[in-house]
Every structure is written in C-alpha cells, then in structure tokens.
Image (cartoon, helix red, strand yellow):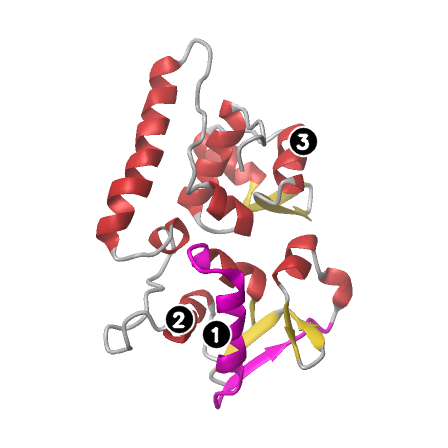
Amino acid sequence: MAGDDLTASESAILVVLMAEAREVLSTELRDRYGLVVRKPQRDKLTRLHYVASRKSGPTYALQLDDKGWVRMQSDLDFALRGASALGAALTALQVSLRDRVLARSGCATLAELFALTDVRAPAAEPAGSLEARVVAAYRALADEPGAWVSLRRLRPFFADVPRDDLDEALRQLSRSEGVTIAPESNQKTLTEADTAAALRLGGQENHLLAIGV
C-alpha cells in the first residue's frame, strides 16, 4: 500500500475513524474532535477504498472501509511541519497498538480490537475455527438474531485471512441451518465497496448475511 501518498492529515483521519469503529457524520467529527474532513480528502480516501462515504442530509457519513482497516496494519506517516511532537505521538500510538497491544489482546486484527462489542469466537469453539469467528463477528454487528449484515461490514474483521479462505468459510456456513447469504434486493443502493465485498454463491453475487433465521 506504499505509494498512496497519504498526507499527515489524511492518516490522522484514518486513525480517528479506526477509533470510532462505526459510521460517523462529518459534522460529529467536527463537533467532537474539531476534525474537518474536506472534500479533496474525502474523495481521495474514498477512491482508495480506505473510507466508505455516503451523503446523509447536508453532510456525509464516513466509516473506515475494508482496505482502510488493512491499511492501518501498515506504517502511516504523521510528519507535519511545525508539529513534530504530535506526529511522533500518533506514530508511537499506531505502532504500539499494532505491534504490542494487538498481540496481547487475543484479537486477530485492529478491526476486532476496536469493535464496539466482542467479535472473538467463544472459547468453547475449536481453536482457529474461521466459521466460529464469522458467527461471532456477525453477532457483534447484527442488531438482533436474523438481522441482515452486509459483507462489506463483515470483511474488515478478517484482514488477517486470505479472501479465498474467508469465502470458503462463508460458503460452508451457508449450508448450516438458520444461515442465509443473499443478494441485496435493491441493487441501486449498492456501493463500490458492497460490490467488492460480494460473495459468488449459487450463480449470483451475494451481499448480505443473516444468522438465526
């Protein structure tokens, strides 16, 4: 991912969205943190698929996207003229989270570490069970059993897993009772990120997962 030429400000936006670990309005970022995400920054981060953005009334809703979570696993450049101490602090924070805290947390990725609820597979499940991790991540993301969860929201929790392996785990899981993987009925609502996260199954592209139906 080197060569994306992220500025210190763009890197800082990714850090804030990682810490929020949810969809958040630009106005809320401004009010809570004094962070103003300008259009060129938003467009660039969206183009790189580091951030998913959508229009929400007069403002935009932003969320760290699949590739954004993966990007957070690599070094970011926070060098900023006149603010070297601030840049050093952010660099130390990111490196420590990735190299020290993550290793001790029992989480496999930063997406899991910053999830609003626990997405780790239950201890009773077989060690390394990818299907168990998928179920645990689904339960953390779903509002209730049987609710639809987009694969776009699920995939960032598996940045440490090859895509083919995750796809196979999803296919195996789809054969289980109470599990449904389906396409989005309103295709007009699909974003590029939704399309990229889709799973080819049953001769069609599927975008949604429900467990407990």
Going from N to C along the chain, the mark reached first, 3 or 2, is 3
User: Element type at marker 1?
Assistant: helix
**Residue most toward the bottom?**
177
Label 3 close to label 2 by CB (< 8 Å):
no
Location of residue 144 in the rendering, given as x and y in whole percent from the top left corner:
46, 75
The residue wearing badge 1 is: 169
Q: Position of residue 149 (x, y in %)?
A: 54, 69
Q: Which mark is residue 39?
A: 3
Segment tinted magenta in the rendering: 157-185
Quarter of the image that includes the N terminus: top right
Label 2, residues with CA under 10 Å away: few <14, some 14-19, many ≥20: many
Going by the numbered disc 1, the residue's amino acid type is Ala
Check the image and report above or below for 11 versus 52.
above
- How many angstroms separate mark 2 from mark 1 (CA)? 6 Å
Q: Earlier along the polypeptide chain: callout 1 or callout 3?
A: 3
- State which mark lies toward you, 3 or 2: 2
Location of residue 161 with respect to 134 vertically, above or below = above
Q: Quadrant of residue 27?
A: top right
* Residue 174 highlighted magenta (yes or no): yes
Q: Mark 2 points at which residue?
A: 130
In this rendering, position of residue 162 left or right of residue 41: left
The reply to whether the C-beta atoms of the residues labelled 2 and 1 are less than 8 Å apart is yes
* Residue 123, quarter of the rendered image: bottom left
- Tell me the kind of residue under disc 3: Lys
Report the Cα–Cα distance between label 1 and label 3.
38 Å
Residue 119 in the image: state x and y as whole percent. Answer: 36, 64
Q: How far apart, in angstroms, are the residues tagged by discs 3 and 2?
A: 38 Å
Task: Please report the residue visible at 51 percent of the width from the left and 25 percent of the height from the top.
Answer: 9
Magenta span includes 133:
no
